[in-house]
Image: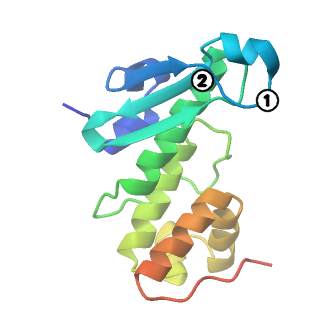
Amino acid sequence: MLPARNILLSSGDQELLRYCKISFTKGTGPGGQKRNKTSSAVQIELPELNLSAQDCTECSQIRNRENALQKLRMEIAFLCRISPAVPPETMECSLNSPRYPLFAAQLLDVFADSKCDPRLTAEKCGVSPTALLKKLHRDPHLWQYIQKMRISADLHKLNPPS
């Protein structure tokens, strides 16, 4: 049985891989003989949620696996909502932090519970609307997902913060 979303997002790589199928293939595209001979491309599937992520940007299978796991965590963060929403413990979280997928998921939970209203979301998170929009805008994938949520709710797109 799959653990709760927040546990998946905050678990280490080995713990998350227990629930995944992983496959290795030869990368495609430019890179010469090395790329065509080694199975460095990685695809990771999480069958219970029907999610997958892949990466072949590096020559190293280990780094590609780490990148694919990070992409999978962000897919989980984008697609799995929890209600009632619990705001992140702190609004300070680097994009490179291992805590970032959980942070993004919790922000999206609050945003969804607030009917995609940035003012209400900011109030629940204890920050100003401008600070919230800047936090969302720094991650292009998160910003794009927020815009899709608003369009699905028949709301206009948000203007980028200045």
Q: Quadrant location of the N terminus? A: top left
In percent of width and height, residue 156 lies at: 55, 89
Q: Which residue is pictured at 45% across the width and 55% down the height? A: 78
The reply to whether residue 160 is in sight is yes
Q: Which residue is pictured at 28% across the width and 63% down the height? A: 83
Q: Which residue is pictured at 43% across the width and 38% down the height? A: 52
Q: Tag 1 or tag 2, which sits nearer the N-term?
A: 1
In percent of width and height, residue 110 lies at: 42, 67
Q: How is the image coloured?
A: rainbow
Q: Amino acid at mark 2?
A: Ala
Q: Is residue 32 above or below residue 126?
A: above
Q: Residue furthest left?
A: 1
Q: Amino acid at mark 1?
A: Pro
Q: Local crowd at mark 2 within 10 Å, few (<14), some, or many (≥20)?
A: many
Relative depth, front residue between 153 and 86: 153
The reply to whether residue 116 is in sight is no
Q: Is residue 33 above or below residue 22?
A: above
CA gap between label 2 and label 1 equals 13 Å
- Report which residue position mark 1 lands on: 30
Left or right position of 144 against 24: right
Q: Which mark is residue 162?
A: none
In the rendered image, which quarter is residue 84 located in? bottom left
Q: Is residue 116 above or below residue 126?
A: below
Q: Which residue is pictured at 62% across the width and 17% down the height? A: 40
Relative depth, front residue between 95 and 141: 141
Name the mark nearer the viewer: 2 or 1.
1
Label 1: which secondary element: loop
- Report which residue position mark 2 lands on: 41
Left or right position of 43 against 64: left
Q: Local crowd at mark 1 within 10 Å, few (<14), some, or many (≥20)?
A: few
